């Protein structure tokens, strides 16, 4: 396989990754709605630790664990933001703008 | 579905995501090896722009484009690191430590 072949392979993988990340976001939103009904906190450190345990266990390389964890830190950040919008804004997470950033502007 | 059901769903999605991210890393390594043979640069801005175009086009939500791009910025960073290790170190990217970090320590 030459570089062009590998790039086509990467483009196919990216299609699948985008679909899976969106499925994961939809699940995070569903949890956000349930949390809103029950007044549960968005940030649950024990659950996040469990996620990191799961992904390390699933990791068969070649990605080193540390790089995988780096990727997942960003994934978890984004999912938490999606969930926060679901709880505060009642489903605005599908808008292209980032409502939480406006709210959190002074924190940046 | 209650929160526990959604979390099981997320854990399943994470298994698939970890596998796909590793397939993508393996492809980046393969490209790294080919680049080493032909003295091509690791950082190719046009190819990265193409990747971002592809993922925006594939995005059907609920993840907003900006959040998806944020995730991919991290993915591209990590893949570039993996590729650099492949080019400089001849395949050390499977080690759990981060050799590039040692080299780049003074930059941090």
Image (tube, coloured by chain):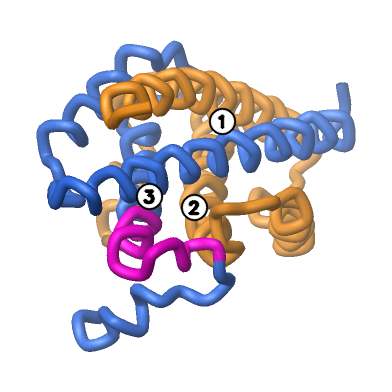
Chain colours: A blue, B orange
Q: What residue is pinned by disc 1?
A: B86
Residue at the (54%, 54%) spot, across then down: B63
The answer to whether one can see residue B53 in this image is: yes
Q: Quadrant of residue A23?
A: top right
Residue B31 versus residue A66: which sits nearer the camera? Answer: A66
Image location of residue B93, percent across then percent down: 46, 26
A33 on left or right of A24: left
* CA distance for labels 2 and 3: 10 Å
The answer to whether one can see residue B88 in this image is: no
Q: Quadrant of residue A2?
A: top right
Please give the chain letter of the residue carrying mark 2: B
Q: What residue is pinned by disc 3?
A: A79
Most frequent secondary structure within the magenta stretch: helix
Residue at the (55%, 62%) spot, across then down: A94
What secondary structure is marked by label 2?
Answer: helix
Residue A70 versus residue B79: which sits nearer the camera? Answer: A70
* CA distance for labels 1 and 3: 31 Å
Assess whether residue A19 is covered by the magenta stretch. Answer: no
Start and end of the magenta stretch?
A81-94
Q: 10 Å neighbourhood of mark 1: few (<14), some, or many (≥20)?
A: many
**Which label was assigned to residue B71?**
2
As drawn, which residue projects farthest toward the bottom?
A106
């Amino acid at each position: 396989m030459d570089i062009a072949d590998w790039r086509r392979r990467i483009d196919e993988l990216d299609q699948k990754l985008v679909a899976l990340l969106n499925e994961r976001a939809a699940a995070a939103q569903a949890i956000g709605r349930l949390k809103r009904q029950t007044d549960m906190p968005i940030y649950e450190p024990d659950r996040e630790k469990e996620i990191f345990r799961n992904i390390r266990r699933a990791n068969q390389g070649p990605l080193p664990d540390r790089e995988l964890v780096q990727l997942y830190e960003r994934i978890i950040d984004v999912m938490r933001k999606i969930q926060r919008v679901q709880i505060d804004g009642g489903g605005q997470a599908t808008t292209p703008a980032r409502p939480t950033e406006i709210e959190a502007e002074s924190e940046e």
